[in-house]
Amino acid sequence: MLVTDVNYIMSGYRRGIFPMAESKSSRKIFWVKPEERGIIPIGQLHISRSLKKFIKSNNFYTTTNSCFSEVVERCADRENSWINPELFNLYIDLHHEGYAISIEIWLNQELVGGLFGITVGSCFCGESMFSTIKNGSKLALIVTMARLTYNNYKLFDTQFLTEHLKSMGGKTISQASYENFLAPIINDDRSLLPLPKDYSWSDLVQLNNHIL
């Protein structure tokens, strides 16, 4: 199928399905409805001692929506990417409409990690993430979960469960359970953007029920 309409694609997310391409060279997009859905319970991100030490020993900072297209490009810049040009353009359209959000991690003015996803009511659907240094994507997960917790989101959907996400507290639930959880929250009025500008990494980690 060719998906060009933002309202149409958002109707899929509201039904608990999401778009993918076979490869970055494919021109086709198809809907995915997995038997099991990856999630990370809100406020229950696992942050290891070594990761906390890593945060303390480096001068990282974070932004939101400062370079959305670059984050998507970095996520797609891998050999087996499922983000084709059609999906890339679709994500840009979703971003312009306020549905797609990016989280960026910076070190010494360099973009070293990030992720992007789609907000559906009080559910955040994480689409993809990248890292150019050790732990870059883990820092993006910390920031994302902190924002989800602060803004009273109910669900962090990771779509699939990888070993990387499992190590951060991810788990799977059935697709049916996911859809039952999603249905009553798709019309919630939420935004990932509000967060005090003076929040430190200690504050962000604490929103994950940890102490830095």
Image: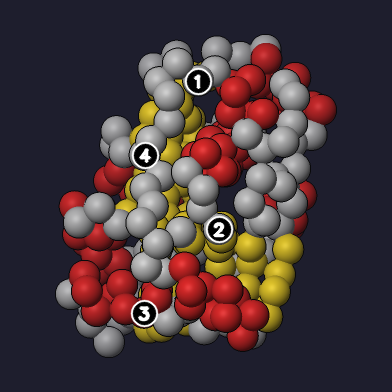
Comparing marks 4 and 2, which lies closer to the viewer? Answer: 2
Comparing marks 3 and 4, which lies closer to the viewer? Answer: 4
Instruction: Tell me if I can see residue 66 in this picture.
Output: yes
Sequence order check: which comes first, mark 3 or mark 1? 3
Above or below, 190 relative to 20: above
Question: How far apart in space, not on screen, are marks 4 and 2 (Cα)?
Answer: 16 Å
The residue identified by callout 3 is 12
For badge 3, the amino acid type reads: Gly
In-image side of 76 versus 173 (left or right): left
Badge 1 crowding class, 10 Å Cα cut-off, few under 14, some 14 to 19, many 20 or more, is few
Helix, strand or loop at mark 3: helix
Residue appearing at x 37%, y 68% in the figure = 187
Sequence order check: which comes first, mark 2 or mark 3? 3
In-image side of 139 versus 190 (left or right): right
Badge 3 crowding class, 10 Å Cα cut-off, few under 14, some 14 to 19, many 20 or more, is some
Helix, strand or loop at mark 2: loop
- Whether label 2 touches label 3, CB < 8 Å: no
For badge 1, the amino acid type reads: Tyr
Helix, strand or loop at mark 4: loop
Sequence order check: which comes first, mark 1 or mark 2? 2
The residue identified by callout 2 is 154
The residue identified by callout 4 is 193
Quarter the N terminus occupies: bottom left
For badge 4, the amino acid type reads: Leu
Badge 2 crowding class, 10 Å Cα cut-off, few under 14, some 14 to 19, many 20 or more, is some
Sequence order check: which comes first, mark 1 or mark 4? 4
Question: How far apart in space, not on screen, are marks 1 and 4 (Cα)?
Answer: 13 Å
- x and y percentages locating residue 75 in the rendered image: 43, 50
